[in-house]
Amino acid sequence: MLLQLLTAVAALAGAACSLLAEGSGAAAVSGILPFTAGGFIYLGTVSVLPEILRDSGPAQALLQLLALLAGVAMMLLIAHYE
């Protein structure tokens, strides 16, 4: 229960920081984007990779890993062309 409260408070703090950084332009984006992308990649790999390795055969695990890497590649392409 306490951990859920901490998560909710962190989400509100993140929303407040993003609203405060709204007018600061490209400097804020160049600092926040790598941190956010790294967080998403970390969460995706920490939660997905153990399930892939535990619950499926080698062929299915390879397909799922390739799909995960394709998602990371799409994020990089979007960040590059945006």
Image (cartoon, helix red, strand yellow):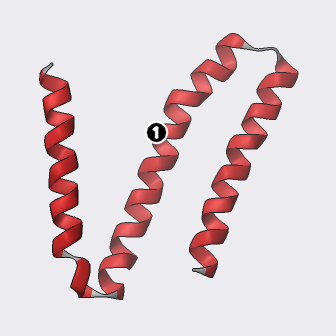
Quarter holding residue 15: bottom left
Q: Is residue 16 above or below residue 9?
A: below
Q: Is residue 32 above or below residue 46?
A: below
The residue wearing badge 1 is: 43
Q: Residue at x 15, y 19 (%)?
A: 1
Q: Measured from the top left, where is residue 9 in percent x and y?
A: 13, 42
Q: Residue at x 41, y 68 (%)?
A: 33
Q: Residue at x 46, y 39 (%)?
A: 43
Total of numbered circles in the picture? 1
Quarter holding residue 66: top right
Q: Residue at x 61, y 28 (%)?
A: 49
Q: Mark 1: few, some, or many residues within 10 Å (few <14, many ≥20)? A: few
Q: Measured from the top left, where is residue 21 in percent x and y?
A: 21, 76
Element at badge 1? helix
Q: Is residue 47 left or right of residue 64?
A: left
Instruction: Check disc 1 and give the amino acid type.
Output: Leu
**Quadrant housing the C terminus:** bottom right
Q: Measured from the top left, where is residue 80 in percent x and y?
A: 61, 77
